[in-house]
Amino acid sequence: MKLRSKIRIFRSAAISILAALVLVSVITPLQPVGKFISGAGNLMLVTQASGGNYDKYDVITNIAPGADVRDVARRHNLPIVRNLGDNVYLFRLQTSDSRTVEQVVVELKADRSVAWAEPHYFAKLPELDGTDQRSSPYIDQRSSGYIDGVSPSDYFVQYAVSLIKADLARPIANNGLGVTVAIVDTGVDTNHPVFHNVAPGYDYLGDGPNPAEEGSGPAYGHGTMVAGIVALVAPEATIMPLRAFDSNGSAKIVDITASINYAVDHDAQVLNLSFGLLTDSQLLSKTISNALSRGVVVIASAGNNNSSSPQYPAAYPGVLAVGASDQYDAKASFSNYGAFVGVAAPGVNIYSAYPNNQWAWWDGTSFSAPFVSGEAALRLSHGGGDVVQVIKNTAVPCCGGLLGRGRIDALAAVRQ
């Protein structure tokens, strides 16, 4: 049997297994409340009333204008661990403290010197039943079939490219040249040959300047694949990698928001956020509002629960929430939908860069969002204006109206 025939059989089997086991897209809400439920296609936090999804010692607090944080800390017997900026501080309960985080949050909210307080939320992937989502059927091992000695043909000719007309939009819009897209994720393997232009980023887990993919967990490669899709749509756009999630898909809100602030402070024009929370974090909301006020285009995945319940940051005002469609312009079975979703983009059987010069297929709204981020880069490179509104106005109606204005059309967006 020819190698390519074998690959296609593996690929078909992979897709079948994928659908059966729901490994890369969470489409069933049957997990216990309080668990982080996600396929690696989308990082999702589910909160609960008491414990489990936040650090058991940390509290994030916004001090009211004119109040002294030291007075607040003394009154509530809470050491100040970190100044997060804008009058927001990270407090930490001492291990000898008998209070719970929930109790401290209630106490702080009752203090007139406190504008708001919340737990220090984190996201964490669930157990994956010992199944490796990155097994051989999902990673393309071919050594032939490359274009220009750089990328395999399936990367350039996959259905998503022609469907959104990215191939026709690129030459009109300078391939996205001059636009920086920040990727807040598991890091990016910037040595992959698909990436032409890379800006300095940061690793908020390792606290260092090298935000590369690390580890061997089930989310390994997520950020590289997201960045690879941006590069597919806008190959000359500059990728700014920011590592907030580890290879197990875990991240704390302070690392996510620090990454967003870094992107804003270092002149990123587009922010891709392929993760979400089912609760409204006030720190995340405040950070997103700041990014929007600075003119950054914020793109976020809508989520993979096949639900109309909003997730954040996708549901924040001004953020463009992206649902997943398939090659037939139908809603992907796993995609969230409803009033908070702005547009759709392909998110089924997406082929992109994978660490160590490899390539892989994956499903999820995580991989729909970067198609829109790439489109935003093309529009900014060519015309600018109200980019989010242009993307919405030029979308093609699809998916029974469940996914906002419809599936994106990059050619129409750059021509408008």
Image: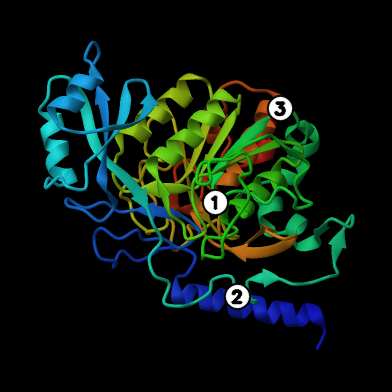
Type of amino acid under label 3: Ser
Q: Is residue 148 above or below residue 388?
A: below
Image-quadrant location for residue 182: top right
Measure the alpha-carbon separation of dots 1 and 3. 27 Å
Type of amino acid under label 2: Ser
Image-quadrant location for residue 353: bottom right
Q: Earlier in the sequence, mark 2 or mark 3?
A: 2
Q: Is residue 409 above or below residue 63?
A: below
Which residue occupies 60% across, 60% down? 327
Near-viewer residue (151 or 335): 151
Near-viewer residue (81 or 18): 81
Residue farthest bottom in this picture: 1
Q: Which residue is mark 3?
A: 381
* Residue 322 position within the rendered picture, expressed as x and y whole percent measured from the top left: 49, 45
Front: mark 2 or 3: 2
Residues at circles 2 and 1 in contact by the CB criterion of under 8 Å: no
Q: Secondary structure at mark 3?
A: helix
Front: mark 2 or 1: 1
Near-viewer residue (216 or 282): 216
The label shown at residue 186 is 1
Label 1 crowd bin: few (<14), some (14–19), many (20+), radius 10 Å:
many
* Residue 224 position within the rendered picture, expressed as x and y whole percent measured from the top left: 63, 52
Measure the alpha-carbon separation of dots 2 and 3. 38 Å
Q: Is residue 296 left or right of residue 27?
A: right
Residue 345 in view here: no
Quadrant of the rendering where the C terminus is positioned: top right
